[in-house]
Image (spheres, rainbow, N blue to C red):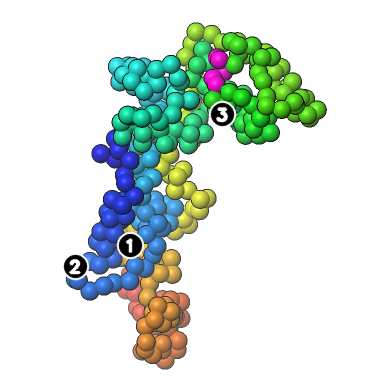
Amino acid sequence: MMSFYGLPIGVNKHMDFFRARLLWQENDQKKKYHLVKWSEVCRPKDMGGLGIQNLTHMNKALLCKWWWKLYTTEGLWQDIILKKYIRNKNLGSVSVKQGDSQFWREILKHRDHFTSLCKFTVGKGDKTRFWEDWWIGSAPLSKNLPRLYDICFDKKKTVKEILDNGIDNMHFRRTLTRDSRVLWEHIKEACSSVTLNEDNDEVKWTLTKKGVYTVKSFYRHLIENGIRYPHLYTWKIKMPPRVKVFMWLALKNSILPKDNLLRRGWKGDDKCPFCGHKENINHLFLSCSVTRLLWNILKCAFN
Ligand SMILES: [Zn+2]
């Protein structure tokens, strides 16, 4: 289902509500603290989460597989889509029309994010947008030359349309300033070395080494914010899952010693019941005299 339809926000929230409850609540009906933010729980383990799926991102990554199919392969399904929705437009310029199916509307929402992660090699030039796709230089021309892009007509035109029409016939809404003119001359020069041919435009996905789209690569990209989780070994040790999750919580400083409980509005004595020092996560695991004794016994027992 998630690869055919966009998950409505309400449904998503509802599912997350129950999934979170399943995780934190266990069997009894008593309300329990949610110890780690849900968005963090839903990260892959090597990004510090529990590896529970983020449904919004997975939904998007699955839907974008259709774009990959449309851009890189031919077949009956693609023909139907082209005839039904695209007609005289092209993949990059088509937009939502009245009467379009829900499936197509959802897919269209994600096109620009998808194409922003692709690198195009021009053949016929009919699937590559001149300004908005990355086919020349180090990024899309719209990114590298935002001022020219702002004042150009034909923002959505393909490389083929622009080159067939003659790049000298490209018009702008204002007369170009001296700087812009110099830039534009550079672009024209670069374009003059491009010759269109009968091959299909080639699309490479920039998030995988082989240049081929994978749901996983996009999913991870959507979640990623540069954080790498340094404690991956906790998942590799042979222990019951329950203990692993507990260690994961402890490393995130998300278990509930008394100092954390106090911060959440709990009322009570914040002293360690064994030694009378203030109880916090470090005390509980490392510095309390009882803990130290326990570690020593374990060390002797297991050598
Ligand atoms: Zn203590």
Instruction: Name the amino acid type tagged 3.
Output: Glu
Quadrant in which the C terminus appears = bottom left
The residue at the point 28 percent across, 55 percent down is 14
Element under label 1?
helix
Q: Give the CA separation, mark 2 to mark 3.
A: 52 Å
Report which residue position mark 2 lands on: 27
Q: Residues within 10 Å of mark 1 (few under 14, many from 20)?
A: some
Instruction: Name the amino acid type tagged 2.
Output: Asn
Report which residue position mark 3 lands on: 132
Does 245 appear in magenta?
A: no
Question: Is tag 2's residue or tag 1's residue first in the polypeptide sequence?
Answer: 2
Q: Residue furthest top?
A: 198
The residue at the point 36 percent across, 36 percent down is 106
Label 1 CB less than 8 angstroms from ligand 1 = no
Question: Is tag 1's residue or tag 3's residue first in the polypeptide sequence?
Answer: 3
Image x and y of residue 108, in percent: 40, 32
Q: Which residues are magenta?
A: 157-161
Answer whether residue 214 is visible to the viewer in this image: no
The residue at the point 58 percent across, 10 percent down is 164
Element under label 3?
loop
Q: Are marks 1 and 3 in contact (CB under 8 Å)?
A: no
Does 160 appear in magenta?
A: yes
Front residue of 222 and 130: 130
Q: Are marks 2 and 1 in contact (CB under 8 Å)?
A: no
**Residue 244: assigned label:** 1
Q: Give the CA separation, mark 2 to mark 1.
A: 19 Å
Mark 2 or 1: the one toward you: 2
Image x and y of residue 61, in percent: 38, 39
